């Protein structure tokens, strides 16, 4: 380890919340993979990590649990830090194909980080075809999916000089909501006050759920969103929900041209995010149909992270996002009708303070007793079925350690003990879908990827028909398909 002064600082309340969510059946790690056509040099990667990461204090700090009552965990410099504990060199089993890489990624996704050391690791995976892959695991207490992408980009060649840095990501997903939601930031303090009240109520509150509603009403207008969360019905049982095990499985798709996604959205008067979520929802419907599980009239919710960073905060680590619940209209078979319904629901979310309230709630439970935290995490798990996130990566290809990055994929943990995670990432003109599942619930996430490809193909074809006919782009053609809303 480079000589460094031992430093110590407390975790923020929100980062503490993600630390406390760690569970053997649901590890709180953000996982990312970069793929290369040629082998990377281990020594060069090691030097790159030293030069680009170790200057950031968080990457040489471990979590130290409180020694005194009523104090929280702290980041403390690891006096025994060794880069060799964080960069591992592994060989992919023959034949070194995508299936073998998926199995290794799945194994690492199922393996916890060492909490006696700083909570991150890289694996240089050699023997992937004629090239290699570089896998990064970052604990959610260090940062969220946006932070992981920034960490990966910070290692890109040319990033030492601002003039040569890769183009910033082009917003096309949920990150657009942040500026719309920030005016509701006053809700955060009110939500934290509710958390503090919950802390004092303790087990009595858990025994009497009506006390939660009483406390929620104390926060005036912003508390309406919290009350809505508390009053939501539980999601219905489906093959995607159930008791979790330790083993997880990761899969990812070949990229779809982003221009094709944009063209479909333009023809239908929708955003890139509308189009992609419509295809994902259809893929989940196809999976249920194949399993013999009724999909007609079905809805369940996706827990969706919304980036709340200001522009000047984009390079910072930590967790700066809220959560919203998006009801997915699984029961709508027609892809265009499904898109219009999703678009309507997302437009409604853009005017709500739900994400900011959830951010405040996470901060509150990070300071609350374990009983309260477990109750809130369980509530999130019962109200939702999947975690879905959409992050925009660089518009142009990047290089790392002298080699161009062929592809990038990442997965976020399924917070709230959910068994299904869906990640959408754009990179260099393409969009890829990543799926992480609990093996006991969904042993074949590749089937969801196949459904996504087919759903996008069908939606794009319909969009081309609409464009050719110059039909009204924002008019629902068959309102009878619209299912009853679930709140």
Image (cartoon, rainbow, N blue to C red):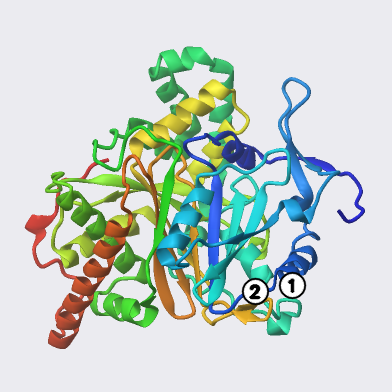
Res 434 visible: no
Question: Can you identify the residue that label 1 sits on?
Answer: 44
> Crowdedness of circle 1 by 10 Å Cα count: few (<14), some, many (20+)?
few
Q: Nearer the viewer, residue 186 or 405?
A: 405
Q: Between marks 1 and 2, how big is the CA–CA gap?
A: 8 Å
Q: Residue 307: give x, y in percent of width and height.
A: 52, 57
Q: Residue at x 40, y 72 (%)?
A: 431
Q: Residue at x 14, y 66 (%)?
A: 476
SS at badge 2: loop
Q: Residue at x 43, y 37 (%)?
A: 417
Q: Residue pushed farthest front? A: 94
Res 409 visible: yes
Q: As drawn, is 466 to the left or to the right of 351?
A: left
> Crowdedness of circle 2 by 10 Å Cα count: few (<14), some, many (20+)?
many
Q: The C terminus appears in which quarter of the rendering?
A: top left
Report the disc number at residue 40.
2
Q: As drawn, is 54 to the left or to the right of 394?
A: right
Q: Nearer the viewer, residue 284 or 223?
A: 284
> Is 274 above or below relative to 416?
below
User: Would you say the residues marked 1 and 2 are in contact, meaning their CB atoms lie under 8 Å apart?
Assistant: yes
């Amino acid at each position: 380890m480079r000589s460094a002064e031992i430093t110590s600082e407390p975790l923020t309340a929100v980062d503490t919340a993600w630390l406390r969510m760690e569970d053997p059946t649901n590890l709180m790690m953000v996982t990312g993979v970069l793929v290369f056509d040629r082998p990377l040099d281990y020594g060069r990667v090691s030097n790159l990590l030293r030069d680009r990461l170790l200057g950031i204090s968080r990457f040489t700090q471990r979590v130290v649990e409180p020694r005194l009552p009523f104090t929280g965990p702290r980041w403390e410099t690891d006096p025994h830090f060794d880069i060799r504990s964080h960069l591992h060199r592994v060989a992919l089993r023959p034949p070194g194909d995508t299936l073998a890489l998926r199995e290794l990624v799945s194994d690492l996704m199922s393996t916890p980080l060492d909490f006696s050391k700083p909570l991150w690791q890289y694996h240089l995976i050699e023997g992937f075809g004629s090239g290699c892959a570089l896998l990064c695991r970052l604990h959610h207490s260090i940062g969220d999916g946006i932070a992981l992408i920034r960490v990966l980009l910070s290692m890109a060649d040319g990033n030492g000089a601002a003039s040569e840095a890769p183009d910033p990501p082009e917003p096309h997903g949920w990150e657009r909501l942040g500026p719309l939601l920030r005016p509701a930031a006053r809700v955060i303090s009110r939500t934290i006050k509710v958390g503090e009240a919950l802390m004092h109520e303790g087990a009595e509150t858990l025994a009497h759920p009506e006390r939660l509603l009483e406390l929620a009403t104390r926060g005036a207008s912003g508390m309406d969103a919290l009350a809505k969360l508390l009053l939501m019905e539980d999601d219905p049982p489906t093959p995607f929900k159930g008791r979790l095990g330790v083993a997880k499985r990761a899969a990812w798709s070949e990229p779809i041209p982003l221009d094709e996604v944009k063209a479909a959205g333009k023809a239908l008067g929708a955003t890139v995010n509308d189009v992609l979520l419509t295809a994902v929802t259809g893929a989940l419907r196809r999976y249920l149909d194949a399993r013999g599980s009724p999909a007609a009239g079905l809805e369940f919710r996706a827990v969706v992270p919304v980036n709340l960073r200001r522009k000047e905060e984009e390079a910072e680590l930590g967790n700066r996002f809220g959560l919203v619940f998006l009801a997915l209209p699984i029961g709508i078979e027609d892809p265009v009708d499904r898109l219009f319904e999703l678009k309507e629901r997302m437009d409604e979310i853009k005017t709500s303070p739900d994400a900011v309230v959830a951010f405040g709630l996470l901060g509150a439970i990070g300071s609350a007793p374990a009983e309260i935290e477990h109750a809130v995490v369980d509530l999130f798990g019962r109200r939702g079925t999947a975690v879905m996130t959409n992050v925009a990566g660089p518009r142009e290809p990047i290089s790392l350690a002298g080699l161009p990055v062929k592809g990038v994929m990442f997965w976020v943990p399924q917070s709230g003990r959910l068994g299904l995670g869906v990640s959408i990432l754009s990179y260099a003109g393409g969009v890829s879908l990543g799926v992480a599942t609990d093996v006991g619930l969904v042993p074949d996430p590749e089937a969801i990827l196949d459904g996504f490809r087919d759903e996008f193909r069908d939606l794009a074809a319909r969009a081309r028909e609409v464009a050719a006919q110059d039909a009204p782009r924002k008019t629902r053609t068959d309102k009878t398909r619209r299912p009853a809303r679930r709140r």
